Image (cartoon, grey):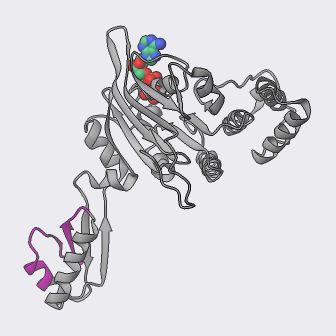
Amino acid sequence: MPTSTNDGRRPSSPAISAVGLRKAYGDKTVLDGIDLCIPEGSVFALLGPNGAGKTTVVKILSTLIGADGGQAEVAGHNIATEPDGVRAAIGVTGQFSAVDGLITGEENMRLMADLNHLSKRKGKQVVAELLERFDLVEAAGKPVQSYSGGMKRRLDIAMTLVGGPRIIFLDEPTTGLDPRSRHNMWQIIRELVSDGVTVFLTTQYLEEADELADRIAVLHEGTIAAEGSADELKRTIPGGHIRLRFTDPSAYHSAATALREVQRDDEVLALQLPSGGSQRELRSVLDWLDAAGIEADELTVHTPDLDDVFFALTGNNAATPAEEAAR
Ligand SMILES: Nc1ncnc2c1ncn2[C@@H]1O[C@H](COP(=O)(O)OP(=O)(O)OP(=O)(O)O)[C@@H](O)[C@H]1O
């Protein structure tokens, strides 16, 4: 789907598009027809339980392995027929990262500069800038195996950026990080996007997808079970409601008697009405209150969170991916 621009340029083609991607290992089908369309400069999150096939999607799109069926374009290059074009445009970090623990952070960065054929002068300059940007100047001379988890992830991303990729695949970038490092990483990802980079993220954390992603796809049993913005996904499942709270008992009782399908909480004078949280539903409740001359002291709209969405799509007996990871 082309994205529109507000400066009059022609709409750009997607950064990543895929139709009917399939992959099986032996007789086990891992991907059973995956379609994707990811606009340039956006963050896309692929969510799924352990073993759902998230890393397999990243490996196919980054040309590390081939698909058994379907086709995809990354940065305008076909993954099967123009893998070199794809590789030149992307950066990949995560479970198969290129970081070498035995050498220093700076040496790792220099290696990446050489691999990207940067001149000595340019390489030195880019490495220095990235070490500074990722707060690794002090650690630059130390062997990477002495780094914390957060420092290693930062170095991994810094190394990926040496080649100036327009599209970055981040495979579970914050798994195992403490909350502070996770928030630092989120900030780094936001900065990448503000530079115009497209980010394809896989994550075990629903909260992470909610925080960062423009669009989220839930991978389940080989297909995309649902796709949309976090808000769109939350609206697809029941559980949302409007809550009205009163201080005046007589207003509360009038509203409770007149409104149908309402859940009462007499103790705190609150009413709960099922609602998808749409503007239309909200307006009709407000119009009704006005017409009846009833004034609520507080009106709040509750939508289900991504956990609810995840459970609804992948089965209630499953743990959330984050719970699974903690086991
Ligand atoms: N080389 C391989 N040979 C056989 N099976 C494989 C291979 N690679 C992956 N699989 C299987 O394919 C399925 C999907 O794996 P994948 O690593 O893509 O899942 P994932 O969603 O990234 O999971 P996780 O969150 O645990 O990393 C799993 O059942 C895995 O065991």
Query: Going by the image, does 67 lie left or right of 280?
Result: right
Ligand 1 found in image quarter = top left
| Image position, residue 39 (x, y; %) | 49, 45
Tell me if residue 252 comes above or below residue 192 in the rendering.
below
Image quadrant in which the C terminus is located? top left
**In this view of the protein, which residue sits in the foreground, 174 or 45?**
45
| Image position, residue 267 (x, y; %) | 21, 76
Q: Residue at x 23, y 70 (%)?
A: 280
Q: Residue at x 59, y 27 (%)?
A: 86
The boundaries of the magenta stretch are: 254-276
Tell me if residue 2 comes above or below residue 53 in the rendering.
below
Q: Quadrant of residue 248?
A: bottom left
Q: In the displayed image of the protein, which residue is found farthest to the bottom?
A: 293
Magenta span includes 70: no
Query: Going by the image, does 94 lie left or right of 300?
Result: right
Residue 139 visible to the viewer: no
Image quadrant in which the N terminus is located? top left
Q: Residue at x 11, y 76 (%)?
A: 259
